[in-house]
């Protein structure tokens, strides 16, 4: 008689290998896991939407003959000098300190060649990025590291950071190993100590105060600079409403896939809403106030392709912003460093210990030897190429929908592959006229 | 600018009356002054609690604000001396880089917040979070200060002739705190420290520059225990 066959060893979905490894890590160290990047969990995203394209009731534009505009002007509400960009894709705020000087230079070079803006981050403005960024947005953060009126006036726009998608309601921490003499000097702190970036601004609380803070910033800069307010994807309808009330020219809305230099993994994975879920409530808030297209909406968090760009615009954004994708474009997580990633206990595509300063690609580090690996000229070209591809892809999709400007894309051009995406994006489930919560079933 | 709004007297003082001159014109006039300006003295009348008065100045001029102001008076000041004869709202001299700001009355929350340099003198009391996240500014308060003052203060000196509220110097970095009166409680990582001769000399100079009638020996110095400078799980309970 044959032996009774054994069932295959079965792994627990609840206690997966990933989960168990985290339990073991926590038990060994007594501290939560800190990492960079954005949410790694699967959430409804732009991949769950499709463009319908032209057909009998719509006619397309000829791809190689008819123009499809991509320009966008940010800051038309109050600023005397709005920012005019050739493409609706900007580079998101990332700090010097978190990133190396060559990386900041590369971002500036690439953005400038592509006709768009880049953004400072916590830690102040460096000559690398000001010098190589034709249009530079200067972040005004709770820490105020490096903040000064001269740089405020040298900026092309000011972005008041209230929150970010990776950690709405959280601050940041730059660990001591990345605090070199230069970084420390810019932040007015000793070398080698962990530098906390506060989660709240030190001199205002709430939108009534922020309105006055923005008045001060405008007075200092002669009402020339567009003032952005950046919020994490928490309560987008109300956050956008209050940002308009506070006087924003531009609102930057960052969903939970948006990256960070470093924070707790539990924060990244469990706080905030997916980018897809944030856009329609934000646009609705602007429409309810009669401010859609008057206060521009920039969406960020997980933008990777021209399709993502086009879908965000179709849902009502005026522009998008990229951070993680820009870092990948200039060399982050490149397979050529696989052997070194493995030495660090990681692998290509998964390396996220950006806070430790040992990045083999020379991007999220202050180590001179590692930084020297990144050629800012070549990396800038790569970013330019990537931005151009995003733009071409976005134009291709817009033309297919019959649009002569990418801003003419609209929710009516989309359908959703899943009920969740249909509900979040408020577009019909594919093959139906059903928008969950809106009827039509 | 309206001719009636500016009265230039034979003493060389230019007066800006905010009942007639909009805030933008007041600040524009002051911001337009350069290091070599001959016009160095200004008086702002009837500020009526206006916000953002005399912000973003960058010249060695003297500005007297006759009355009380709202938020962020003298914000991001460089070089200028701004004297407010009344009281000020939140965030006076926030992010000041250099120069001097003198308040005859009281200051609301966040006085001198994130200031990088210069001297802020409050002759009355200052409310909570005085000197929050200060980065090199010197602040002298003749009266008392409120709770959470010098929170995450990085550099500079905070001198208090009166008492300090709860959680003084919480999460302090390298700023020095000198208090003559009582401290209701110290914040995380803030401890009493020895007053050495160099601190006495520093304090004497600050008191002198701030017009404060007090002896340095009467003060207690507080600073960072530096236990929280690098994360240590054994100190997590101190936060």
Image (tube, rainbow, N blue to C red):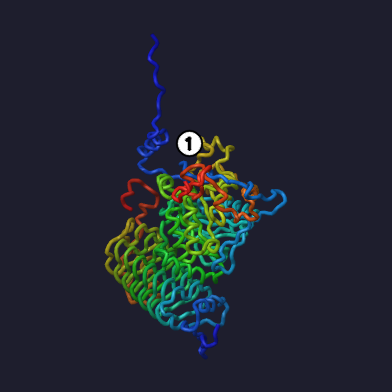
Q: Is residue B111 left or right of residue A215?
A: left
Can I make out residue A175 in this image? no
Q: Is A125 on the left-hand or right-hand side of A389?
A: left
Q: Which residue is mark 1?
A: A345
Look at 52% across and 67% down and name the residue there.
Answer: A149
On screen, residue A414 above or below A136: above
- Residue A78 is situated, as x and y percent measured from the top left of the image, at 54, 68
Q: Residue lying furthest bottom in this view?
A: B10
Give A202 or A340, whichever is nearer the viewer. A202
Residue in the foreground of this view, choosing between A405 and A436: A436
Residue A70 place in picture, x, y as percent: 63, 55
Q: Is residue B131 above or below residue A378?
A: below
Q: Is residue A179 visible?
A: yes
Chain assignment, label 1: A
A189 w.r.t. A338: above or below: below
* Residue drawn at x 68%, y 51% as measured from the top left: A61
Dot 1 falls on a residue whose secondary structure is loop
């Amino acid at each position: 008689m044959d032996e009774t066959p054994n069932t295959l060893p079965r792994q627990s979905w609840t206690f997966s290998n990933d989960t168990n490894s985290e339990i073991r890590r926590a038990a060994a160290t007594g501290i939560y896991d800190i990492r960079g990047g954005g949410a790694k969990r699967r959430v409804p995203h732009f991949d769950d939407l499709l463009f319908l394209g032209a057909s009998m009731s719509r006619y397309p534009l000829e791809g190689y003959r008819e123009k499809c505009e991509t320009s966008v002007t940010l800051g038309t509400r109050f600023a005397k000098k709005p920012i005019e960009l050739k493409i609706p894709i900007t580079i998101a705020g990332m700090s010097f300190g978190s990133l190396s000087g060559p990386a900041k230079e590369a971002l500036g070079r690439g953005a400038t060649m592509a006709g768009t803006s880049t953004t400072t981050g916590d830690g102040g403005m460096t000559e690398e990025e000001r010098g190589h960024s034709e249009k530079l947005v200067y972040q005004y953060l709770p820490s105020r590291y490096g903040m000064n009126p001269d740089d405020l006036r040298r900026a092309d726009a000011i972005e008041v950071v209230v929150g970010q998608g990776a950690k709405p309601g959280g601050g940041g921490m730059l660990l001591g190993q990345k605090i070199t003499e230069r970084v420390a000097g810019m932040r007015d702190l000793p070398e080698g100590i962990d530098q906390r970036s506060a989660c709240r601004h030190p001199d205002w609380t709430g939108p009534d105060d922020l309105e006055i803070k923005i008045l001060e910033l405008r007075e200092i800069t002669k009402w020339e600079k567009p003032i952005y307010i950046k919020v994490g994807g928490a309560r987008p309808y109300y956050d956008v409403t209050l940002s308009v009330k506070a006087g924003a020219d531009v609102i930057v809305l960052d969903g939970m896939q948006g990256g960070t230099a470093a924070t707790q993994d539990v924060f990244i994975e469990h706080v905030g809403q997916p980018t897809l879920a944030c856009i329609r409530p934000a646009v609705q808030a602007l429409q309810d106030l009669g401010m859609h297209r008057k206060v521009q909406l920039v969406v960020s968090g997980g933008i990777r392709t021209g399709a993502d760009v086009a879908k965000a615009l179709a849902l009502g954004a005026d522009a998008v912003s990229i951070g993680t994708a820009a870092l990948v474009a200039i060399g982050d997580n490149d397979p050529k460093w696989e052997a070194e990633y493995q030495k660090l206990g990681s692998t290509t595509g998964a390396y996220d210990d950006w806070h430790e300063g040992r990045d083999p690609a020379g991007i999220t580090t202050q180590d001179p030897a590692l930084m020297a690996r990144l050629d800012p000229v070549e990396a800038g070209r790569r970013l330019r190429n990537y931005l151009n591809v995003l733009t071409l892809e976005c134009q291709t999709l817009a033309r297919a929908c019959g649009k002569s400007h990418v801003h003419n894309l609209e929710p009516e051009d989309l359908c959703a592959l899943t009920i969740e995406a249909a509900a979040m994006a408020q577009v019909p489930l594919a093959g139906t006229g059903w928008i969950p919560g809106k009827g039509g079933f | 600018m309206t001719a009636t709004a500016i009265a230039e007297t034979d003493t060389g003082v230019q007066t800006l009356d905010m009942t007639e001159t909009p805030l933008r014109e007041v600040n524009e006039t002051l911001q337009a002054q350069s290091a070599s300006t001959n016009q160095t003295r200004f008086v702002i009348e009837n500020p009526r609690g206006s916000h953002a008065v005399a912000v973003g100045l960058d010249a060695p001029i003297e500005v007297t604000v006759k009355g009380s102001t709202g938020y962020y008076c003298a914000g991001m000041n460089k070089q200028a001396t701004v004297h407010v004869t009344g009281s000020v709202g939140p965030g006076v001299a926030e992010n000041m880089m250099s120069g001097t700001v003198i308040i005859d009355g009281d200051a609301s929350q966040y006085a001198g917040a994130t200031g990088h340099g210069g001297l802020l003198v409050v002759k009355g009391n200052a409310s909570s979070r005085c000197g929050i996240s200060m980065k090199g500014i010197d602040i002298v308060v003749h009266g008392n200060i409120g709770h959470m003052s010098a929170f995450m203060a990085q550099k500079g000196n905070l001198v208090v002739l009166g008492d300090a509220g709860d959680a003084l110097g919480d999460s302090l970095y390298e700023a020095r705190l000198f208090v003559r009166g009582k401290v209701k409680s110290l914040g995380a990582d803030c401890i009493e420290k020895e007053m050495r001769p160099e601190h006495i000399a520093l304090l004497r100079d600050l008191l002198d520059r701030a017009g404060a009638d007090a002896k340095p020996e009467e003060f207690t110095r507080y600073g960072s225990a530096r236990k929280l400078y690098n994360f240590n799980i054994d100190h997590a309970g101190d936060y």
